[in-house]
């Protein structure tokens, strides 16, 4: 039986009589626990008696006794008639420190396929795509809606709600989509999610098996690629052109998809609108091949030219289309509320699994959002934002024409919160984007959205939603300097 160790020497340094160091009991407990875990106190070792250790450390015996009792409650030591002994711990509880994480279980192989994009550490950096005009959000009206929701809701709303979402919000979304987007649905077909990203991930989990083929737009939304990779799908990039997703007969024959992700109302990031001929052809071919279409109705609420373009989901009855939307741009990103509309036959098949996969939450926010829609506040807010974004886009176009002194072409602009500026291949768009961050600018490199980049996939995606129009001219001048420097080989 091992003899009691010299704990006073083992603990390396005296206990600190300092409030910031914690109580003497906590310090002793932590040091003994660390010595047991790193093997300094071997399994089976008998600890000194509480009186002897208290005298050696010049602390109260009650402090030692309490620390021993705490260790015993956690299972580190075991008291018996002969004293207190260190418990026999299994090897995994006694790690050996090395330069690497020895013995650490491996992560999933799919993680290696999910490539990180640019991390923006400054949320208010200018030209960052996808950020709405946060300073123009009607916070007072939203606060009143939240207050009403909390004041009028029963205590039961503090518990879990319907996993598919609050009935009031599902009904409000169904009515809004029918009027504003031409979507054919009942409230039962609407499922609330934490943003469009979770909705896309749910579509992948519900409708695909590992190895199934998924089509994504190229260049296109990185979140859709991540969702398919996380679902172990075989991802096939389909090029986009001036009319959106460009799938031909060869694509259908060689790579028949299970899922097709598309942004038909405003292709992200190129800004194209999927033509009606291609929409109808895509639906027809998806039916013929047993595929599902995920329609991400990205930025459709902010149409700047002509009448709004209706959703693909409502073009024909019983289309194999899952409609995805979010309030991140129309309200604010941290709200984390999105939704998807499932075809009625599909809803019947997945409703029970969805109840197991989801948990109701954000109930007061959902009720407030329903009130915001039904009271007309949401529509009025959208109207104000459309006018604001239209003015900002026109100002950005003018600034680009005046001050971007490198060859370029502008894509999109019919909709949304960003413009895509294409540059000749000799300008390194990723270098420009990296250099811009040092000047508190956050344009996205167009090539970063492509799976199989082409020479034309070179340029900058400029968000104008959260940047006031009077700032565009000096900002574009700075971008022009950065682009020229990148052409010359760096700054």
Image (cartoon, rainbow, N blue to C red):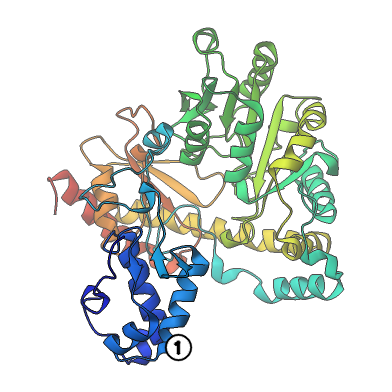
Left or right of 323, for residue 31 = left
Q: Where on the picture, by quarter, is residue 290?
A: top right
Residue pictured at 59% horizontal, 70% vertical:
136
Front residue of 65/11: it is: 65
**129 or 163, which lies in front?**
163
Using the image, determine if residue 318 lies above or below residue 195.
Answer: above
Q: Residue at x 70, y 29 (%)?
A: 321
Q: Kindly state the secondary structure of the residue where label 1 is placed.
A: helix
- Which one is nearer the viewer's eye here, 267 or 224? 224
Residue 213: x and y, percent?
53, 20
Percent coordinates x, y for residue 308 in the rendering: 68, 43
* Rendered image quadrant of residue 154: bottom right
Quick check: can you spot residue 276? no
- Say above or below: 221 vs 372: above
Which quadrant does the C terminus fall into? bottom left
- Viewer-proximal residue, 294 or 314? 294
- Reply above or below: 370 against 113: below
> In what quadrant of the picture does the N terminus appear?
bottom left
Residue 259 location in percent, x, y? 60, 24
Task: Please rate how many residues cluster around mark 1, counting C-alpha atoms within 10 Å: few if below 14, some from 14 to 19, many from 20.
Answer: few
Q: Which residue, given by chain and number where applicable, does mark 1 sit on?
A: 62
| Image coordinates for residue 464, horizontal then vertical, percent | 46, 57
* Residue at point 33%, 41% (across, down): 459
Does the image show residue 106? yes
Q: Quadrant of residue 123?
A: bottom left
From what the image shows, is residue 359 above or below residue 61?
above
């Amino acid at each position: 039986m091992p003899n009691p160790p010299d704990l006073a020497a083992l603990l390396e340094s005296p206990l600190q009589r300092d409030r910031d160091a914690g109580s003497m009991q906590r310090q002793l407990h932590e040091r003994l626990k660390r010595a047991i875990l790193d093997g300094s106190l071997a399994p089976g070792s008998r600890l000194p008696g509480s009186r002897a250790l208290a005298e050696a450390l010049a602390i109260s015996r009650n402090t030692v006794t309490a620390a021993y009792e705490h260790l015993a409650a956690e299972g580190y030591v075991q008291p018996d008639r002969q004293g207190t002994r260190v418990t026999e711990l299994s090897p995994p509880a006694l790690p050996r420190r090395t330069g690497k994480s020895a013995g650490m279980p491996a992560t999933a192989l799919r993680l290696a396929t999910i490539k990180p994009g640019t991390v923006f550490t400054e949320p208010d950096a200018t030209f960052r795509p996808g950020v709405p005009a946060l300073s123009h959000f009607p916070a007072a009206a939203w606060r009143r809606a939240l207050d009403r929701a909390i004041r009028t809701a029963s205590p039961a709303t503090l518990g879990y709600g319907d996993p598919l979402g609050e009935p009031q919000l599902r009904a409000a979304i169904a009515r809004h989509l029918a009027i504003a987007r031409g979507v054919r649905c009942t409230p039962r077909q609407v499922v609330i999610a934490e943003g469009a990203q979770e909705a896309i991930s749910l579509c992948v989990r519900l409708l695909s098996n590992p190895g199934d083929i998924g089509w994504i737009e190229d260049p296109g939304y990185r979140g859709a690629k991540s969702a398919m990779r996380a679902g172990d799908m075989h991802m096939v990039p389909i090029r986009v052109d001036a009319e959106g997703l460009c799938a031909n007969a060869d694509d259908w024959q060689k790579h028949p998809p299970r899922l097709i992700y598309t942004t038909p109302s405003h292709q992200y990031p190129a800004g194209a609108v999927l033509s009606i001929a291609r929409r109808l052809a895509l639906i027809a071919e998806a039916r013929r091949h047993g595929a599902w279409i995920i329609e991400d109705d990205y930025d459709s609420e902010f149409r700047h030219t002509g009448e709004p373009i209706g959703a693909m989901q409502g073009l024909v009855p019983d289309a194999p289309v899952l409609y995805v939307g979010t309030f991140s741009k129309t309200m604010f990103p941290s709200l984390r509320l999105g939704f998807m509309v499932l075809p009625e036959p599909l809803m019947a098949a997945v409703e029970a699994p969805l109840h197991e996969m989801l948990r109701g939450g954000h109930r007061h926010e959902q009720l407030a959002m329903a009130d915001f829609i039904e009271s007309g506040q949401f529509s009025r807010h959208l109207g104000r934002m459309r006018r604001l974004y239209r003015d900002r886009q026109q100002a950005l176009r003018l600034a680009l024409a005046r001050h971007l002194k490198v060859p370029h072409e502008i894509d999109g602009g019919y909709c949304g919160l960003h413009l895509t500026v294409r540059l000749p291949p000799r300008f390194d768009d990723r270098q420009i984007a990296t250099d811009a961050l040092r000047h508190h600018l956050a344009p996205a490199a167009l090539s970063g959205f492509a799976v199989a980049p082409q020479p034309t996939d070179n340029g900058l995606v400029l968000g104008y939603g959260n940047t006031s129009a009077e700032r565009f001219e000096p900002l574009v001048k700075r971008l022009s300097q950065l682009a020229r420097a990148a052409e010359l080989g760096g700054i």
